[in-house]
C-alpha cells in the first residue's frame, strides 16, 4: 500500500467553535493521495519532530527556524503559510534544506484591502469616538467631533503590490487623489487605476490617509519613524495592516501624543500580543485590532483553500503555486521531479 502524503495543520486555526476555515476549504483535502490532521500541540516554533512526521505543514503564526529543519530524519517538504507575510520563516534554511515555502496572497488581497478602506471610513467619520460618546451619555459633545469627507482627499499607499493595488480599486468611488510609493512598481502599471507614483517623502507630505502594505524584511524594518511622522500633515491619519516592526512604535506614540498627526488605525504591533500598558490602547484617536482586522469567513476560506491546494499539488508531483523561495527548486530533492 502506497504511503499517503501527510499534512499537518497548525492548531492556532482552531477556535472554541471549531476551526476558522470553512467547509469549502477542507473539501480540497478530500483527496485519496493525502491524509491530514491538526498538529499535536499549539507551538510557538515548529520542532524538529514535526518536520520528521509531516510531508507538509500548513502554518499560521508559528516560527520555522533552522533548528526546525535540522534533524537527520526530516521528512518535511513544504511549508504552506496562511497569509502573505513570511517573516516568521527562515527562508534561507528552507532553501538550504530543499523545503518549499508557499504563501497565499490570493486569499488576503480583497479582505485586507477592504479592511484598510474600513479603517479609512472609520477614521474619517471618527466612528469610534462617536460610539464612546453615545455609550457614555455624552450626547451634547457630538458637535466637538466633526468628521471629514473623502472627496478630494489624498490616499497614499506605501507598498503597491497585491494588496496595495486592491486598495486603490476599492477607493475608486470616493473621489480621492491616489498616491503610491514602491520602488518595484512602474507608473505605467497603475496609471489605469488613477494612481500617481511618487517618492516616499512626497507621499508622506501630501497624503491625508497613509496606508502601509509592505512585507517585513531588512529594508522595511523601521521604515516609518520620527523623521517620517514629522513630514506628515497634522491632519493626517496613519494606517498599518502590514507588520508592526515596519513602524517604530515609540515614534508613532510620540506623534499621536504631540498631535503631530490626527490619529491612527493599527492592526499590528512591535510586540504581539500587545502589552495592556501600551499607550496606543488608551488613545481616543486610535483604532486598534489584534492582527486580525481582515479575518472574515471569506478570508479564511480563501487562505485555507490556497494553502491546502499547494500541499495537494505537491502530493501529486505538481509544482505548488506561489513559491517564495524559488532557489529551493534547484535543490537535488526537486531537480526533475515536477510534472505539469
Image (tube, rainbow, N blue to C red):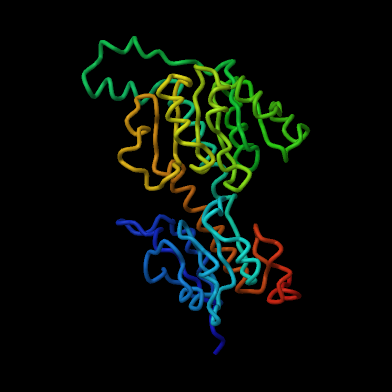
Query: In terms of depth relative to the viewer, which is nearer, 276 or 105?
Result: 276
Give residue 121's position: percent from left, percent from top: 47, 25
Q: Say which residue appears at 48% left-offset and 74% top-offset.
A: 48
Vertical placement of residue 208 versus 335, above or below: above
Give residue 159's position: percent from left, percent from top: 63, 38
Please state the total of marks drawn on the protein image: 0
Vertical placement of residue 188 versus 219, above or below: above
Vertical placement of residue 260 versus 215, above or below: above
Give residue 312's position: percent from left, percent from top: 58, 69
Tell me the quarter of the image containing the N terminus.
Answer: bottom right
Q: Say which residue appears at 25% left-offset and 10% top-offset.
A: 140
Tell me the quarter of the image containing the C terminus.
Answer: bottom right
Query: In terms of depth relative to the viewer, which is nearer, 100 or 298?
Result: 100
Give residue 274's position: percent from left, percent from top: 37, 43
Q: Residue furthest bottom?
A: 1
Q: Residue furthest left?
A: 137
Query: In terms of depth relative to the viewer, which is nearer, 299 or 243?
Result: 243
Q: Residue furthest right?
A: 188
* Quadrant of residue 337 within the rendered picture: bottom right
Q: Say which residue appears at 48% left-offset and 78% top-offset.
A: 53
Query: In terms of depth relative to the viewer, which is nearer, 72 or 317?
Result: 72
Amino acid at each position: 500500500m502506497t504511503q499517503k502524503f501527510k499534512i499537518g495543520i497548525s492548531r492556532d486555526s482552531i477556535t472554541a467553535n471549531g476551526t476558522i476555515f470553512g467547509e469549502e476549504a477542507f473539501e480540497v483535502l478530500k483527496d485519496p493521495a493525502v491524509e491530514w490532521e491538526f498538529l499535536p500541540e499549539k507551538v510557538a516554533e515548529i520542532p524538529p519532530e514535526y518536520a520528521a512526521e509531516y510531508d507538509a505543514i500548513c502554518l499560521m503564526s508559528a516560527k520555522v527556524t533552522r533548528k526546525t529543519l535540522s534533524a537527520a530524519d526530516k521528512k518535511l517538504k513544504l511549508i504552506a503559510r496562511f497569509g502573505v507575510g513570511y517573516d516568521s520563516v527562515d527562508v534561507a534554511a528552507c532553501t538550504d534544506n530543499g523545503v518549499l515555502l508557499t504563501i497565499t496572497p490570493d486569499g488576503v488581497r480583497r479582505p485586507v484591502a477592504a479592511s484598510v478602506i474600513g479603517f479609512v471610513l472609520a477614521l474619517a467619520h471618527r466612528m469610534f469616538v462617536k460610539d464612546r460618546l453615545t455609550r457614555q451619555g455624552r450626547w451634547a459633545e457630538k458637535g466637538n467631533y466633526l468628521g471629514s469627507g473623502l472627496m478630494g482627499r489624498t490616499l497614499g499607499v506605501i507598498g503597491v503590490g497585491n494588496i496595495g493595488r486592491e486598495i486603490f480599486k476599492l477607493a475608486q468611488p470616493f473621489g480621492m487623489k491616489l498616491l503610491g510609493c514602491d520602488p518595484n512598481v512602474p507608473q505605467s502599471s497603475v496609471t489605469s487605476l488613477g494612481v500617481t507614483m511618487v517618492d516616499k517623502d512626497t507621499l508622506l507630505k501630501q497624503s491625508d490617509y497613509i496606508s502601509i502594505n509592505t512585507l517585513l524584511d531588512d529594508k522595511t524594518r523601521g521604515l516609518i519613524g520620527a523623521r517620517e511622522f514629522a513630514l506628515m500633515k497634522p491632519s493626517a491619519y496613519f494606517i498599518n495592516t502590514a507588520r508592526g516592526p515596519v513602524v517604530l512604535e515609540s515614534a508613532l506614540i510620540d506623534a499621536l501624543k504631540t498631535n503631530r498627526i490626527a490619529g491612527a488605525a493599527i492592526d499590528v504591533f512591535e510586540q504581539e500580543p500587545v502589552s495592556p500598558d501600551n499607550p496606543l490602547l488608551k488613545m481616543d484617536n486610535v483604532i486598534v485590532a489584534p492582527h486580525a482586522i481582515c479575518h472574515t469567513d471569506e478570508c479564511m476560506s480563501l487562505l485555507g483553500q490556497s494553502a491546502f491546494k499547494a500541499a495537494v499539488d505537491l502530493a501529486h508531483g505538481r509544482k505548488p503555486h506561489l513559491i517564495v523561495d524559488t532557489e529551493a527548486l534547484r535543490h537535488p530533492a526537486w531537480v526533475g521531479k515536477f510534472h505539469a
